Amino acid sequence: MRDLFTVATFTMKDLLKRKSFIISNIVIWVIIIALFNVPNILKMINGDNDTSSSEKLLIVDNNNVFEGALEILKQNELGYDIQTSNDELTFDNIKEKIENGDINQAIIIKSENGNINIEYIVENLLYVSEVPKDIVSSLSTIYTNLQISKLNLTPQQIQNITPNFSFEMKQTETQEVQGNNIVMMLLSLVLFYAIYFCAYQVSTSITTEKTSKIIETLVTSTNPRTIVLGKTVGIGIVGLIQVFAMIIIALISNNLFLEQGILDKIVSIENLTPFLLIMTLVYFLLGYFAYALMYALTGSTVSKPEDVQSANSPVAILAVIGFYLAYFTMMNPTSDLNVFASIFPLSSAFCMPFRIMMGIATAKEIILSILVLILTIIIIARISIKIYSNAILNYGSKINLKDIFKFYKQN
């Protein structure tokens, strides 16, 4: 245990002192701060006036078809800065206003032979495919209500013409799905990158030490099993520190740079319970150990840092398959395939936390998933340590698959 702690401590110190590690973390922190400042940057670009960011729309009713009722549009939240006019404005007049920046687009309403013609004018049709549907719907509603009011109908007749529909959604599945898709997708990405990049550093660390001959000192001081597990634990602790640092910076940035309540409108965090956070941490650690031990195996098979990427390709493919299996089955979280993804060891670390978040994971599924993942880690550890013990002092060419089987059969 003392040797394990020594190797883990050495690995942590070595990793934390690397310039590449320090610079990459600073870049990540700067990106997080910049993302939380996007609303402020947009305000600086567009100015502080809220209406300046809205499209300025001029609606011209030359023939007074709507009898002054277009003012109602200004009360609706359509995302436009709406201006109305009954003046006789021609196409050239509208063009001049658009070129001067007075408006961004215009609608001219004309009544001809009992028909209502709407002319939609924009600067360039390349960026617009149709008349905005919300504007068309609002104009249609206003005109319909205007004509109904002229018929002197009773309130009951008006209600029969325009009934209020009440919609209710139900599902045939017995399991109730809760949660926010944006939260689940964001956490899925964070978990994947945290596990993947932390585990990837294990193979890089092993290969680097073989190049610098540090591994010879380690081998004479302790056994290969302690080296593999110690390096995995050390890099895992550093990975946890990285994740917590990013979360803390994100929370501080949210409080400093975003207006109160903006993040709540975008992302609902009401389902982030203490139990979910604990289980997410458990699956992060288990998923990390599973992939880190596989990367320890591939790292021990090469003696040059430039060969690490090609040696890690099979494990990287497995990680991507596991992530996308979890990611795409979230579209139908009550399916059998999603249940399989939450138990399958390559994808369970990315999938099960979100079944827990959605409230559809049973205690039996969680226990089974953890047991399968732990069993997988034990099997991978035994294989990795045995191959690592025989390949650790290899300084020749990259070890092929035949050599790996040969090393595994050796005592």
Image (spheres, grey):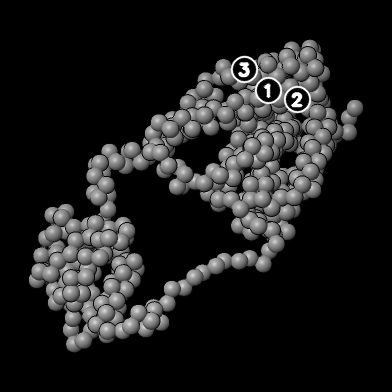
In terms of sequence position, does the residue under pointer 1 or pointer 3 come before the other?
A: 3
Residue sitting nearer the eye, 118 or 72 = 72
Residue at x 18%, y 77% (from the top left corner) = 65
Query: Quadrant location of residue 210?
Result: top right
Q: Secondary structure at mark 1?
A: helix
Query: Quadrant location of residue 303?
Result: top right
Gap in angstroms between the C-alphas marked 1 and 2 = 10 Å
| Residue 36 in view, yes or no | yes
Residue sitting nearer the eye, 175 or 80 = 175
Depicted 69 relative to depicted 377: above or below: below
How packed mark 3 is, by other alpha carbons closer than 10 Å (few <14, some 14-19, many 20 or more), is few
Q: Amino acid at mark 3?
A: Asp
In the rendered image, residue 43, in percent from the top left (x then y), is placed at: 29, 41
Residue sitting nearer the eye, 114 or 71 = 71
- Residue identifier under label 2: 228
Image position of 284 (left or right of 108): right
Depicted 207 relative to depicted 290: above or below: above
Image position of 19 (left or right of 298): left
In the rendered image, residue 71, in percent from the top left (x then y), is placed at: 21, 65
- Residue identifier under label 3: 14
How packed mark 1 is, by other alpha carbons closer than 10 Å (few <14, some 14-19, many 20 or more), is many
How packed mark 2 is, by other alpha carbons closer than 10 Å (few <14, some 14-19, many 20 or more), is many
Name the quadrant of the N terminus: top right
Q: Nearer the viewer, mark 1 or mark 3?
A: 1
Q: Amino acid at mark 1?
A: Gly
Q: Nearer the viewer, mark 1 or mark 2?
A: 1
- Residue identifier under label 1: 234
Residue at x 55%, y 67% (from the top left corner) = 168
Q: Amino acid at mark 2?
A: Val
